[in-house]
Amino acid sequence: MKKYIILILLLFTACIAGIAFGSVKIEPEIFIKGLLLNEEAQSQSIIIYHLRIPRVIAGLIAGIGLSVSGVLLQSVTNNDLAGPNIIGVNAGAGFFCILLLSFFPTMIKFLPFAAFIGAFLTTLLILIIVKKVNSAKGTVILAGIAVTTLLNAGISFLSLLDSDVLTSYNSFSIGGLRGVEVGELIIPSVIIAVCLIVSLIFSRQTYLLCLGDSVASSLGVKTKTVRFIGLICASASAAAVVSFAGLLGFVGLVVPHISRRICGNEPKKLLITSSFVGAVTVITADLLGRILLAPTEIPVGVLMAVIGAPFFLFLLITRRSTNA
């Protein structure tokens, strides 16, 4: 219980800091007036309510969605190196989003649905490849890299056909929360909330998949059904984030590992802890991106790549040392 109180306090602190600080400096007294919609601080009120609060909410939702996706993917694939960006889930969602923007630009409201289809089909393809080739853990990563490369090539090709799509894709591919509006977060937040609830309901069965299908089946788990449900929730969570934050990477890989250090491998605790840690991570990274080189902004996707890439290499090195 003590750990959760600390996590709640950390999240609250990150949210307040994300609202209070940014590329535009606001003095504490003026910040309070702006927060209270005082007429003396109208411009600050606009910054707080129209720019900063939506970004903090977006960071909260993105952190939860990608963390839940990461935990589920690592359980479904039985591979602790799996993550939405590592095995191609993000790229699949991104490809279908660009596909929609290229051929049906007026149907932008269907972006979350397109992202889900892309993420789900990509994850399904990866699992089929792994089953056909072999079940080694490294195969998941290699198949993911191959599929991601192919999808990124498709995204680049479509972007070159239309300069407007190319402009949209540049910011989309980096991943960021700039310009996010509260209205466009409603559908993604509902999707992620439903996925989290379903994941918690099936958390024990999903966790037992890590023991192998034969052992899980002997314990009464319907492996195919549970894996399929986990796959849908992981894809939908990642896709929901992609629809408003772009290809934000490494959150789904890094956060589950940090969370295991905090709460262990107990499935429900891991999902809840990862949600808190993921939200704090994304909100903090976005805040740092706004203040480090102010007034120039560093997209949160860039900062997550700086943190995540070395972490991924560290996992590879430690795994090789363990297996040696």
Image (cartoon, grey):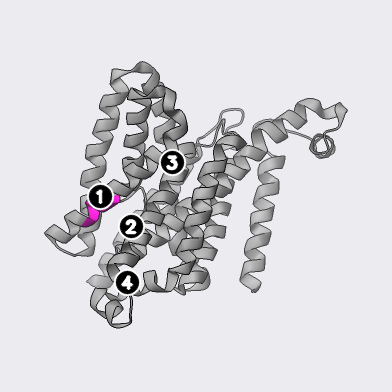
Q: Say above or below: 26 vs 7.
A: above
Residue highlighted by disc 2: 82
Q: Say above or below: 278 vs 206.
A: above
- Image coordinates of residue 302 in percent, x first then y, are 45, 39
| Label 2 close to label 1 by CB (< 8 Å) | yes
The structure residue drawn at horizontal position 54% and vertical position 37%, both measured from the top left corner, is 177
Magenta stretch in the rendered image: 123-127
Q: Amino acid at mark 2?
A: Ala
Q: Amino acid at mark 4?
A: Leu
| Label 4 close to label 3 by CB (< 8 Å) | no
Q: Which mark is residue 242?
A: 3
Q: Earlier in the sequence, mark 2 or mark 4?
A: 2
Q: Which mark is residue 323?
A: none
Residue 125 lies in the magenta stretch:
yes
Residue 198 lies in the magenta stretch:
no
Q: Amino acid at mark 3?
A: Val
Q: Earlier in the sequence, mark 2 or mark 3?
A: 2
Q: Is residue 303 left or right of residue 53?
A: left
